[in-house]
Image: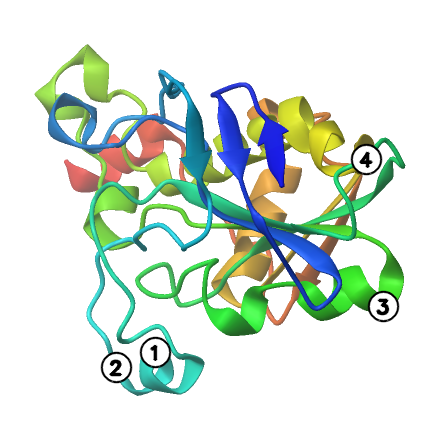
């Protein structure tokens, strides 16, 4: 099955009565001069890109939780801004969309962990499921304004990655049988905390319509000016 996205065509596969597309890039690789910076649009590709295997997850140290979840042996790399789509059919049905934001303390995990495939939801509930990777640890949450204006968005790169994935969903999910006007974000632990942050993030306004925070709560966060004052 081939679907056209804003970046180019992707080829998925059918399994268990649903279509799966894995490892679709939703932003430019955050490497080199883009390291620590807010996500930038992907330049796209020519031809058909295979979306048959998950993309690399964000660099992380594997522990007991990762071994249990199945992510300990998955490929890692700084080029990690990928998402996965599971859908009953790539048609014009306009199904409800669920976007999963994984937990892991903002230092571990991935949207491509097998437990998060969304296959059962798509089979049972006729919904489209999107799961995302985002930058973790120092690469996702280090505040570096002292390096220049280009790093003004550093410190929140991981959250801005999530916003970029939601923009991709808005712009492309109709091609996968989903309704961009009926998007629910849900997440667990650090993913649940992310949901609380997205609810208060102006950049995310209008990109989702319902939210489920599982075992994670909103927390008070500092503004950039507040963080600099604390650091001083």
Label 3 or label 4, whichever comes before in sequence order: 4
> Is residue 21 rendered to the left or right of residue 137?
right
The residue carrying pointer 4 sits among few (fewer than 14), some (14 to 19) or many (20 or more) residues within 10 Å by Cα, namely some
Q: Residue at x 56, y 46 (%)?
A: 12
As measured in the structure, the alpha-carbon distance from the residue carrying label 3 to the one carrying label 4 is 17 Å
Q: Is residue 221 visible?
A: no
Residue 91 tag number? 4
Q: Residue at x 85, y 68 (%)?
A: 124
As measured in the structure, the alpha-carbon distance from the residue carrying label 1 to the one carrying label 3 is 27 Å
Q: Which residue, given by chain and number where applicable, does mark 3 sit on? A: 124
> Is residue 131 rendered to the left or right of residue 96?
left
Q: Which residue, given by chain and number where applicable, does mark 1 sit on? A: 66
* Number of numbered discs: 4
* Residue 125, quarter of the rendered image: bottom right
Front-lying residue, 104 or 87: 87
Q: Which residue, given by chain and number where applicable, does mark 2 sit on? A: 63
The residue carrying pointer 2 sits among few (fewer than 14), some (14 to 19) or many (20 or more) residues within 10 Å by Cα, namely few
In the image, residue 224 lies at what x, y percent? 34, 29
| Location of residue 108 with respect to 172 vertically, above or below | below
| Location of residue 145 with respect to 136 vertically, above or below | above
| Location of residue 11 with respect to 43 vertically, above or below | below
Q: Classify mark 2: helix, strand or loop.
A: loop
């Amino acid at each position: 099955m081939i679907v056209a996205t804003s970046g180019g065509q992707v080829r998925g596969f059918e399994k268990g009565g649903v279509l799966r597309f894995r490892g679709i890039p939703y932003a430019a690789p955050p490497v080199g001069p883009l390291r620590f910076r807010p996500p930038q649009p992907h330049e796209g590709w020519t031809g058909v890109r295979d979306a048959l295997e998950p993309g690399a997850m964000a660099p992380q140290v594997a522990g007991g939780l990762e071994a249990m979840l199945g992510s300990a042996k998955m490929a890692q790399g700084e080029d990690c801004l990928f998402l996965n789509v599971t859908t009953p059919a790539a048609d014009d049905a306009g199904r409800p969309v669920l976007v999963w934001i994984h937990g892991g303390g903002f230092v571990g995990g991935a949207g491509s962990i097998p437990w998060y495939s969304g296959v059962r939801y798509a089979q049972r509930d006729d919904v489209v499921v999107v799961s995302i990777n985002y930058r973790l640890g120092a690469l996702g949450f280090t505040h570096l304004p002292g390096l220049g204006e280009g790093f003004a968005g550093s410190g929140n790169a991981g959250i801005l990655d999530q916003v970029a994935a939601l923009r991709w969903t808005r712009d492309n999910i109709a091609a996968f049988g989903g309704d961009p006007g009926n998007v629910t974000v849900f997440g667990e632990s650090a993913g649940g905390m992310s949901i609380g942050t997205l609810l208060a993030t102006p950049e995310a306004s209008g990109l989702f319509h319902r939210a489920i925070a599982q075992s994670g709560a909103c927390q008070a966060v500092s503004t950039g000016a507040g963080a600099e004052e604390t650091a001083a």
